[in-house]
């Protein structure tokens, strides 16, 4: 009976994960939950699942959570990134599903793999920032890192059709997001509401904005590099608006294996929990006859220059992923707060990435220092930019 901790349980992926676990039945048991500041929803989830361990963003949220829970002996409450890592390290936690947004998920990812557990990973920043460290720790401890992102889950499944040395390249698909057909000259006027109106996926705000700029796909290129040991030349991206083919793997003999499914994150979530077994599921099945046509095209790299940043980070390595991740998180936050334009995000991130103090073989401290530096530098750049307008 696997015991599961869902980190980021109040977000879109976390809520779907709890739905999947409930549908799997008593064989899977939720013992840990973590959220940022959504205290009331977390308290409700704790009551519904009977989770023993809860974590929130800070001490203030922890006090509010304690007040929201019934006045009896209840779950242990943790706070901060250390709280996430504490839950992941518990001896009675077997699987950690990390759907935490941003770099806050890194300590828990490292704690999970160091303990030799299964990490069902939906927090891409953990690998973007410190993929070399996370995967090295997983190899050392024998931990399983199973991707939850639909594209990487698709690659993980398609790779089962051959040996690693037979792989010619991996092709990640991108929906193009809500603005792909919008003229470039209109990008300055895009509002947060427009950027969040994704045509096929229901996701959190940060990842949805990244999808609108294609920075999300740049992050996924870096993820694929670390998860599957791929060079930049072995990774390609195609725009596929229907979001039905999630990734393809081309083998040396010309065979191409694709994983198809509806644009529903519950499928990769369940697969990460039950692998190597496939279980029955109750969601809508793919109807190819109803689709009739599937479309693929090369991405417009002039209109969406963010994509190249992912390949740059793969080629350069070191602390560049931490710089990219930290800068993107701050820039997207500024856009959602309506302090900058959507078109300001990528140039700002590119500028910070180019200027960051690069370290070739970073320690965890180097990575965390780079992340902090990138956040401060991005905030400084944005303040300087907006004050000059």
Image (cartoon, rainbow, N blue to C red):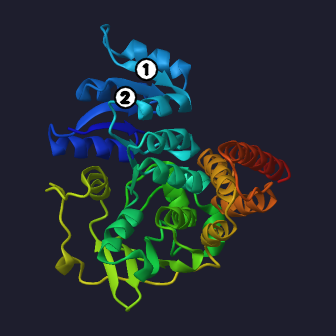
Question: N-terminal of the two: label 1 or label 2?
Answer: 2
- Residue 334 vs residue 313, the one in the foreground: 313
Above or below for 34 versus 382: above
Residue ID at (42%, 75%): 164
- Residue 29 vs residue 264, the one in the foreground: 29
Image coords of residue 162 (percent x, y): 33, 78
Above or below for 44 versus 371: above
Above or below for 161 versus 331: below
CA gap between label 1 and label 2 equals 11 Å
Above or below for 217 versus 89: below
The residue indicated by pointer 1 is 77
Q: Is residue 65 visible?
A: yes
The C terminus, quarter of image: bottom right
Image coords of residue 232 (percent x, y): 58, 75
Left or right, 332 with reference to 64: right
Residue ID at (30%, 12%): 70
How packed mark 2 is, by other alpha carbons closer than 10 Å (few <14, some 14-19, many 20 or more), is: many
The N terminus, quarter of image: top left
Residue found at the far bottom of this picture = 253
Secondary structure category for the residue under label 1 = strand
- Residue 254 vs residue 68, the one in the foreground: 254
- Residue 268 vs residue 278, the one in the foreground: 278
The residue indicated by pointer 2 is 42
């Amino acid at each position: 009976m696997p015991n599961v901790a869902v980190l980021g349980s109040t977000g879109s992926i976390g809520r779907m994960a709890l739905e999947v676990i409930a549908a799997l039945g008593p064989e899977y048991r939720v013992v840990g939950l973590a959220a940022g500041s959504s205290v009331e929803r977390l308290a409700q989830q704790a009551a519904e699942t009977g989770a023993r361990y809860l974590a929130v963003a800070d001490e203030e949220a922890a006090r509010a959570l304690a007040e929201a829970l019934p006045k009896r002996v209840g779950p242990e409450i943790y706070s901060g990134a250390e709280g996430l890592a504490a839950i992941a390290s518990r001896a009675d936690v077997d699987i950690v599903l990390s759907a935490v947004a941003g770099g806050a998920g890194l300590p828990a990812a490292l704690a999970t793999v160091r303990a030799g557990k299964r990490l069902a990973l939906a927090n891409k920043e953990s690998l973007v920032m410190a993929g070399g460290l996370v995967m090295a720790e997983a190899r050392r401890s024998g931990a399983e890192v199973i991707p939850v992102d639909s594209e990487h889950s698709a690659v993980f499944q398609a790779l089962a059709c051959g040996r690693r040395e037979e792989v010619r390249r991996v092709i990640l698909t991108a929906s193009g997001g809500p603005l792909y057909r919008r003229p470039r000259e209109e990008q300055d006027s895009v509002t947060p509401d427009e950027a969040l109106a994704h045509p096929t996926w229901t996701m959190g705000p940060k990842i949805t904005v990244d999808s609108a700029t294609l920075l999300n796909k740049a992050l996924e290129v870096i993820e694929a590099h670390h998860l599957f040991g791929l060079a930049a030349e072995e990774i390609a991206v195609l725009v596929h608006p229907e979001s039905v083919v999630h990734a393809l793997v081309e083998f040396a003999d010309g065979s191409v294996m694709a994983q198809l499914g509806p644009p529903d994150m519950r499928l990769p979530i369940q697969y990460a929990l039950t692998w190597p077994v496939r279980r029955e599921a109750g969601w809508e099945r793919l109807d190819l006859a109803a689709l009739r046509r599937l479309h693929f095209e090369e991405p417009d790299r002039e209109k969406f220059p963010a994509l190249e940043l992912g390949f740059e980070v793969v080629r350069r390595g070191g602390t560049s992923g931490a710089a990219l991740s930290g800068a993107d998180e701050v820039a997207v936050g500024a856009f959602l707060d309506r302090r900058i334009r959507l078109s300001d995000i990528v140039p700002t991130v590119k500028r910070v990435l180019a200027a960051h103090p690069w370290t070739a073989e970073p320690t965890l401290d180097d990575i965390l220092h780079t992340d902090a530096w990138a956040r401060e530098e991005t905030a400084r750049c944005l303040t300087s930019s907006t004050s000059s307008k």
